[in-house]
Image (tube, rainbow, N blue to C red):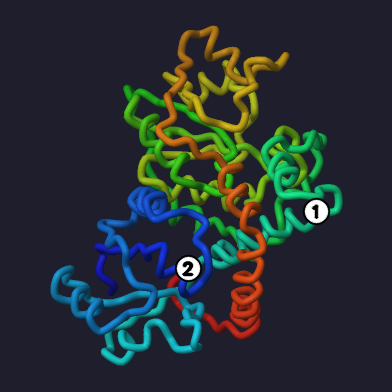
């Protein structure tokens, strides 16, 4: 049985650049993300990409590590050698089944696909960035299937959802806080606003909007990740107690009563900040009830921020993904069953 105190090494920006290409998010944002994962007990910043003799000894002596673990997808250095060769040689390596379809390569590939699709009517980088930020005025019917969600290998199962669930509900006197959103490309800004929201009560309920709702408000190229991917990303956060998969856009009186919601919150940094100007304000009812609270967002990061980073350097990411996608394709074609589902 594997040790139940996972310690995660967060690779430095320089190491990622040298071995994979430019990182999408800088180290300090990735540290916030990994710390928030509810299964992580500790983190090691500035970890090397490859397991060296020195780093391996440090893991065994200073951190009392039993095993070095990686997914069942290959992790190769630019020269083609195995990044975990030393750990395997030492007999201290364990392989686990990776969660398919949610790799950085896959997600970046979806964003690059958006760039290519929109390049026919966008002649420069600034135009692309404006379209990603504004939604380009594209609308879809609520019942339509937004084309923004790209092809995914991710296959959600009821067992997978149970694995991510906290399996506990609120107590009879719990103060239940509700926050909703797309939570697309789950990032450090999401983590920090969820942390603050959780501090306002005893139980944090998060509403995840449908793909169709997001497409209708942000444009046909959104969301990048589909509803199930986004829901599991939020469920993995230690500050979240429960999610509504496919939450309605409007927070109704019936919904507030059904979930016994005490407080509805929204951050000051978000992509739907024009909601109060619309004829249909989704928070009109909680506002009228006096249970709406606007939270000061700790970080000025949105999903568009992440996309702009890709757009601004899309040629470098394209080269990176061309290399990585080949190994991803090889993985899917040649993978074998690995117990650990």
- Please name the residue that numbered disc 1 is placed on: 119
Q: Is mark 1 on a helix, strand or loop?
A: loop
Front in this rendered view, residue 319 or 161: 319
User: Who's the residue at 73% across and 54% down the image?
Assistant: 114
- Please name the residue that numbered disc 2 is placed on: 17
Tell me: 164 left or right of 215. left
Rendered position, 1 above or below 306? below
Q: Is mark 2 on a helix, strand or loop?
A: helix
Q: Residue 308 placed where, x, y %?
A: 62, 47
Front in this rendered view, residue 103 or 297: 297
Q: Residue 217 placed where, x, y %?
A: 71, 33
User: Who's the residue at 62% across and 77% down the image?
Assistant: 323
Query: Split into 4 quadrants, where in the image is the N terminus?
Result: bottom left
Q: Residue 147 placed where, x, y %?
A: 78, 49
Residue that extends furthest to the bottom in the rendered view of this protein? 89
Q: Residue 299 placed where, x, y %?
A: 43, 36
């Amino acid at each position: 049985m594997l040790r139940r105190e996972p310690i995660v090494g967060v690779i430095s920006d320089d190491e990622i650049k040298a071995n994979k290409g430019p990182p999408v998010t800088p180290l300090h944002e990735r540290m916030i993300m990994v710390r928030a994962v509810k299964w992580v007990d500790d983190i090691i910043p500035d970890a090397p990409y490859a397991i060296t003799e020195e780093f391996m000894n440090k893991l065994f002596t200073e951190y009392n590590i039993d095993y070095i673990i990686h997914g069942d997808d290959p992790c190769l250095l630019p020269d083609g050698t195995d990044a975990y060769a030393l750990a395997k040689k030492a007999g201290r390596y364990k392989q686990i089944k990776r969660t398919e379809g949610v790799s950085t390569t896959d997600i970046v590939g979806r964003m690059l696909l958006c760039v290519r699709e929109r390049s026919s009517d966008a002649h420069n980088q600034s135009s692309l960035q404006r379209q990603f930020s504004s939604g380009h005025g594209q609308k879809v019917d609520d019942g339509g299937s937004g084309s923004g969600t790209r092809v995914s290998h991710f296959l959600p199962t009821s067992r997978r959802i149970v694995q991510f669930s906290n399996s506990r509900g609120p107590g009879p006197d719990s103060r239940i806080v509700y926050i909703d959103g797309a939570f697309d490309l789950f990032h450090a800004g999401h983590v920090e606003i969820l942390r603050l929201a959780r501090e306002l009560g005893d139980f944090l309920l998060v509403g995840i909007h449908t793909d169709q709702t997001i497409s209708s408000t942000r444009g046909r190229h959104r969301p990048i990740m589909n509803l199930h991917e986004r829901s599991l990303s939020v469920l993995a956060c230690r500050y979240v107690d429960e999610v509504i998969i496919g939450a309605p856009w409007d927070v109704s009186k019936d919904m507030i009563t059904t979930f016994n919601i005490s407080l509805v919150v929204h951050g000051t940094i978000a992509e739907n900040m024009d909601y109060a100007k619309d004829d249909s304000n989704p928070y009109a009812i909680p506002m009228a009830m006096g249970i709406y609270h606007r939270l000061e967002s700790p970080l000025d990061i949105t999903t568009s921020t992440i996309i702009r980073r890709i757009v601004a350097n899309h040629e470098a990411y394209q080269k990176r993904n061309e290399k990585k996608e080949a190994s991803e394709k090889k993985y899917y074609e040649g993978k074998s069953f690995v117990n650990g589902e």
